[in-house]
Image (spheres, rainbow, N blue to C red):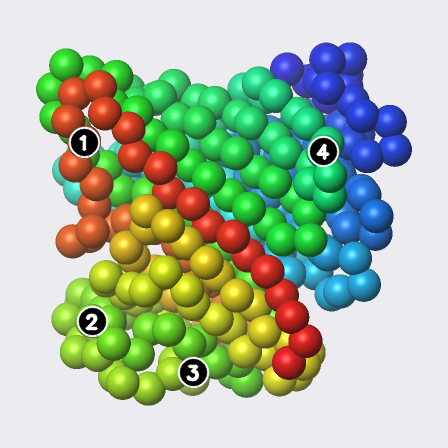
């Protein structure tokens, strides 16, 4: 549906409005009690969330492209049913089909402090349901149901770009006891560091069997971002650093310092195996407090 059709069915005056990019990609614009947010229907991708009285928490590149079939740089891309390149088909899209597919908006509700969207997408072998609740916290829930009569497996992630004052000054806590796969070092397996994580170079690491709470400490903006999750055993930490960022036209050298990706997911060893007809739900809740 285009923005006009969405507005005719779902508009909530003063709270949710619908608009389109110049290329025709529809998005919902949320505003309630000083909180603001944005959700793009292509990919069901959150592209902004800013609690009342706070700085933006979600980063979207100033060079991001909002066009049909194009991945949007930043926000919270939905990664499914594989992470990274397809394991056998080099022509398949990076990170799966969900992040550039047109999702269907099934329900929109404003109740209490939250504005909740429920979306759905059918992919080969799976039916996806995604709930996004904008409020004082940002709550995300992705359910995948195996629609075949055979067991099926998949990888998934909510590829969250967090806005930070300076990626070199933030600390990620909660990964100290987890082994990780370093994709920048030929997928080497690295033993737990037993120390909080700080970034000083290009980072692309898959942490396995992580706890249900992670935290980003940002002294530059005097705040902590808490990431509480369930049904998700992996966390992926990513930043391209300036040289690689310069080669990415939708990011550019002027943006890499302002974000860190700490992604909730089930990838690599933590991929999900579903019996026929079974479902799996992955949830995450993002909140902030003063440092």
Residue 227 makes an appearance in the image: yes
Q: Looking at the rendering, in which quadrant would you find the C terminus?
A: bottom right
Separation of marks 2 and 4 at Cα, in angstroms: 41 Å
Instruction: Categorize mark 3 by other alpha carbons within 10 Å: few (<14), some (14-19), many (20+).
Output: some
Instruction: Categorize mark 1 by other alpha carbons within 10 Å: few (<14), some (14-19), many (20+).
Output: some
Separation of marks 2 and 3 at Cα, in angstroms: 16 Å
Occupied quadrant, residue 186: bottom left
Instruction: Categorize mark 4 by other alpha carbons within 10 Å: few (<14), some (14-19), many (20+).
Output: few
Q: Nearer the viewer, mark 2 or mark 3?
A: 2
Q: Residue at x 33, y 73 (%)?
A: 175
Occupied quadrant, residue 244: bottom left
Q: Residue at x 64, y 15 (%)?
A: 1
Does residue 35 appear left or right of residue 124 in this picture? right
Separation of marks 1 and 2 at Cα, in angstroms: 25 Å
Counting from the top left corner in percent of width and height, residue 15 is at 82, 34
Mark 2 or mark 4: which comes first in sequence? Answer: 4
Mark 3 or mark 1: which comes first in sequence? Answer: 3
The image shows residue 117, relative to residue 189, as above or below, that is above
Q: Are marks 1 and 2 in contact (CB under 8 Å)?
A: no
Which residue bears the numbered disc 3? 198
């Amino acid at each position: 549906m285009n923005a006009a059709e969405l507005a005719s069915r779902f508009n909530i005056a003063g709270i949710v409005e619908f608009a389109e990019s110049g290329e025709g990609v529809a998005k919902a614009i949320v505003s309630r009690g000083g909180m603001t947010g944005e959700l793009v229907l292509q990919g069901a991708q959150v592209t902004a969330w800013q609690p009342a009285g706070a700085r933006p928490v979600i980063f979207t590149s100033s060079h991001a492209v909002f066009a049909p079939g194009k991945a949007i740089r930043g926000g919270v891309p939905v990664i499914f049913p594989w992470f990274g390149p397809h394991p056998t088909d080099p022509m398949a899209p990076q990170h799966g089909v969900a992040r550039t597919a047109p999702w269907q908006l099934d329900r929109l509700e404003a109740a209490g402090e939250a504005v909740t969207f429920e979306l759905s997408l059918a992919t080969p072998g799976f039916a996806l349901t995604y709930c996004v609740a904008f409020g004082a916290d940002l709550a995300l829930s992705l359910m995948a149901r195996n629609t075949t009569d055979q067991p099926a497996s998949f990888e998934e992630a909510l590829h969250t770009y967090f806005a930070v004052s300076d990626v070199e000054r933030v600390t990620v806590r909660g990964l100290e006891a987890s082994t990780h796969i370093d994709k920048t070092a030929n997928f080497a397996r690295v033993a737990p560091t037993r120390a909080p994580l700080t970034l000083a170079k290009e980072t692309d690491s898959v942490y396995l069997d992580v706890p249900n709470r992670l935290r980003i400490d940002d002294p530059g903006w005097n705040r902590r971002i808490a990431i509480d999750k369930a049904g998700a055993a992996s966390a992926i930490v990513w930043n391209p650093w300036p040289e690689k960022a310069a080669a990415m036209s939708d990011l550019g050298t002027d943006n890499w310092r302002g974000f860190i990706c700490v992604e909730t997911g089930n990838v690599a060893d933590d991929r999900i195996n579903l019996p026929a007809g079974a479902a799996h739900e992955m949830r995450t809740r993002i909140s902030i407090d003063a440092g």
